[in-house]
Image (cartoon, rainbow, N blue to C red):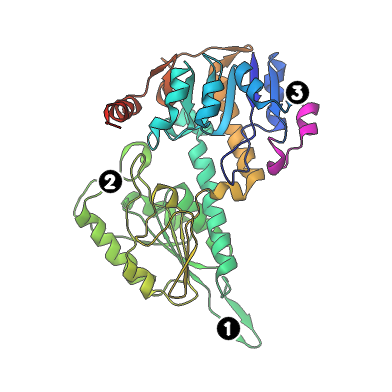
Amino acid sequence: MLIGILKETSPGETRVALLPESLKSLRAQGIDIAVETGAGTAAGAADQAYIDAGATITADRNALLASADLLPAVNALDSADQARVKSGAVVIGFLRPLDAPAALTTAIAQGATLFSMELIPRISRAQSMDALSSMATVSGYKAVIMAADRLPRLFPMLMTAAGTIPPARVFVIGAGVAGLQAIATARRLGAVVEAYDVRAAAGEQVRSLGAKFLDVDLGGIATEGGGGYAAELSEEALDRGRDLITKTASHTDVLITTAQVPGRPAPRLIRRDAIEAMRPGSVLVDLAAPAGGNCELTQPGVTQDIGGVTLFAPLNLPAAVPVHASMLYAKNVLNFLGLIVKKGELTIDLADEVLAGACVAHQGKPVNPRVAKLLESVQSTPT
């Protein structure tokens, strides 16, 4: 069996799917590994490190695509690469099957088996494979560092001979993995932190990190969806949260927003008046920008100055920390490979709930019901 590690081609992508230290257990099973030249360079992994780990290096991307039985990747391959994939090959990565299912049709037509890291069930047995949580951890940390760098104030309270400097006030919206990491990082830097999440159950985790949890009475509306994610809320419920956010923004130096619903546009929680209420020099980091953004003024991928308030809308924040982001992702991928690679051979058992949940397509046919429905909708839409 041959595993191919490709150099990522998405603009700004610096991560790599597997690092040299990931290869030991695979090589011990007699698996051959070929790495495209420069695949890990941006993540601190030189070609020679892969060679030392037992892999071969090739500059021929097309030959690698055509010969690899297993292709772990960070992002989905583009259509040209998909057309070159070996029939029956397995592709693993962040494939965005619920956001852009049409972009996977070429690989499905090739008879490839596709596993999407976003679809791995959030169950205890699969925690070590949860790449979404790994990347959210990186994003939450980096968002605070970005904000601290831009903010014209210090984060911690300082008592000096010249007087006392008050601490920065940070407001985090969404207490999932990214939000909790942002809270923890801001607290380490000495900020006073407040947080809001529609899920009242998140309050305990927020308070355990030393932050204040802001609660809103949503009138008994169910706020938690599957897998621990927030559910999609009604406009009435969203408005109650928006009012709280606008009120809190007026005394906030840094606002970090992370609220997302899988497979849906990000909920618009931050109105223009919230930004207008913030003091000049304040910073807003919208981590939901890849899904459209939580702020109604967000332009994904564009940094704006709105009345003296900086609005960051990063599309791929983990790529700004490629060494550790790749280390975490590679470990997630390696743990997932343990389910489909047995004694050096591919063994795909879709009776396994983790594999069944993550599988987008197998042997040329959609497997995930939601993806199959989306593909059917795409195919039936007149061009």
* Image location (x, y in percent) of residue 136: 50, 46
CA gap, disc 3 to disc 1? 59 Å
The residues colored magenta run 39-53
CA gap, disc 2 to disc 1? 44 Å
Task: Mark 2 or mark 3: name the one nearer the start of the chain.
Answer: 3
Mark in the foreground, 3 or 1: 3
Is residue 32 positioned above or below 99 on the image? above
* Image location (x, y in percent) of residue 37: 72, 32
Mark in the foreground, 2 or 1: 2
Name the amino acid, label 3: Thr
Q: Quadrant of the N terminus?
A: top right
Task: Residue under label 1, please give it.
Answer: 164
Disc 2 packing (10 Å; few <14; some 14–19; many ≥20): some
Task: Residue under label 2, please give it.
Answer: 232
Q: Quadrant of the C terminus?
A: top left
Is residue 22 positioned above or below 340 on the image? below
Outermost residue, front side = 383
Task: Residue under label 3, please give it.
Answer: 56
Disc 1 packing (10 Å; few <14; some 14–19; many ≥20): few
| Magenta-colored stretch includes residue 44 | yes
55 left or right of 250 in image: right
Residue under the point 57% across and 44% down:
11
**Viewer can see residue 355:** no
Residue under the point 30% across and 40% down:
225
Residue under the point 35% across and 49% down:
266
